[in-house]
Amino acid sequence: MTGSPDGEPAVREPEAIANARCLLGRQLAACRRVAGLSQAQLAEKTGFSRSTIANVETGRQHAPGEFWESADTAVSAGGSLVSAHEKLEKAARRARAGQVQVAGAQGPLALPVFYPAAQPLPTAIPGTAAAFPAAPEPDVVAAAAAQARDHAMNAAATGVGPGTVEQLTAEVVRLGRAYVAGTPLPLFAAMHETLGRVQTALGQKAYPAQARDLSFLAGALCGLMANASLDLGREDAADDLARAAWTYGTIIDNAPLIGWARGTQALAGIWDHRYADAAQYAGEGLSHLPAGMGAARLHAIRARALAGHRDFAQARAAIKAAAAASNEHQPDQLHNGIAGEFAFDTAKLRYYEALVLARAGYPADAETAAAAAVSLYQAAPDTARSYGCEALAHVQLATARLMSGNADAAAEAIAGLLRLDPGRRISSLHEHVEACRELLRGPAYRGSRTAAELGQQLAVFSAVSITSALPSSR
């Protein structure tokens, strides 16, 4: 059954007419290919859908005259497609009116054909009583292959340029490495801008590999921003951003990203004194990342959480597990690839060890670990020297010496810290400096001029920091 473009009732067309429609559709397909157009591109030029193009090319759909006029122009057929369609419609109307004999035994209706190779046009005119020349049956194999090819071409189109992922990856690596020695607030703004570009790219049509890479970059940026939020004293924002990083990591099943995110959530819990939650987050991260640099970080964070919970035996065991994990060389795309702020080196491990040992009441061991951390940081290149962790290591060295009753040595340890630029005085420094001041106010240092002067210097230091210009998270 087929309907007339002039609104005539739908009737079953003779086989010769139906075959002629298939032949005309194949002529359209041939002209389209010579013009270098896909079905989707021809659809855009004609204003009809791609499915209409596909159906007309295989003879399954009867298209109106305006379709053929648009298609003829689009493929530069020189009017031949329009002419062939008009002659076909005249023959079809005569067939419906019984004016033309089109017995199936006579073969399909002959039509003028536009041949892209400039071959001569056939001269047979439909509507005569003469037998029509035979034509091959519609090539369903070729039609299916053409349809599959055109669909694949459309599927291959992507809104993400070939260099987009590479460029964004380079920017994330630069930001991750710059953060080690950079000032948090301007870098946070740069991370936010880059994240917006990554998310915009994720909203475009992309290949699966591109979408996976972009999700990884989005997660890495959220992880960096979460870390920066902690340094800016915004534990609430840090928790939200770390959870976003975890979500991106879960979508693409990226264990290092999942582990980093859970570790950062654990740090937010530690700084908010939710030690049980922090230990749980770190443990969950380890279930995804059992070895390598990322695992060392998670063990060390868990050790800090356990020490805060006063489970000192388990805390010391966790620090030993961190050291063992750091010796297991298992590089990954995040901790070793981007590296920078994502790296967890020996200096940071020794600083974490000093924190745990001081909390557990082992000042001599804490002093040894803190001194080792300071030496390692001072030996590192400036671009790879984490000023935040180095400053915290100096505070831990001073704390351990104050616990041992040596105020003069503590003052020596803290001297370099006091010159730290206010834009780099991260939030956690305040808490640890206050712990030093609490020791200086204790009975052991009553009447000590050195202790009084050091306490005053630390009070001035804490009064001006990076967080003083920011809205409070409380």
Image: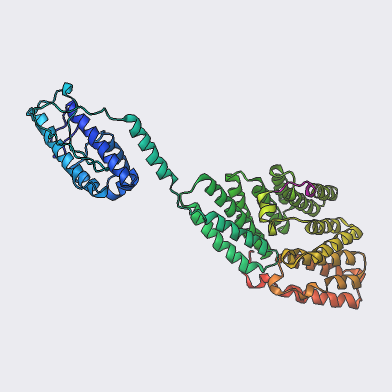
Position of residue 360 relative to residue 56, above or below, is below
Q: Residue at x 61, y 43 (%)?
A: 253
| Position of the C terminus by quadrant | bottom right
Q: Residue at x 29, y 50 (%)?
A: 45
Question: Is residue 146 toward the left or the right of residue 125 in the image?
Answer: right
Q: Residue furthest top?
A: 105
Observer-nearest of 274 and 106: 106
Position of residue 394 relative to residue 268, above or below, is below
Magenta-drawn segment: 325-331
Position of residue 59 relative to residue 357, above or below, is above
Observer-nearest of 390 and 332: 332
Observer-nearest of 274 and 290: 290
In percent of width and height, residue 300 lies at 78, 52
Dividing the picture into quadrants, the one containing residue 473 is bottom right
Dividing the picture into quadrants, the one containing residue 57 is top left
In reply to whether residue 125 is colored magenta, the answer given is: no
Observer-nearest of 43 and 319: 43
| Position of the N terminus by quadrant | top left
Q: Residue at x 25, y 28 (%)?
A: 136
Dividing the picture into quadrants, the one containing residue 404 is bottom right
Position of residue 380 relative to residue 26, above or below, is below
In percent of width and height, residue 110 lies at 17, 32
Q: Residue at x 81, y 53 (%)?
A: 307
Instruction: Residue 387: tell me if it is visible.
Output: yes
Instruction: Residue 1: tell me if it is visible.
Output: no
In percent of width and height, residue 8 lies at 13, 35
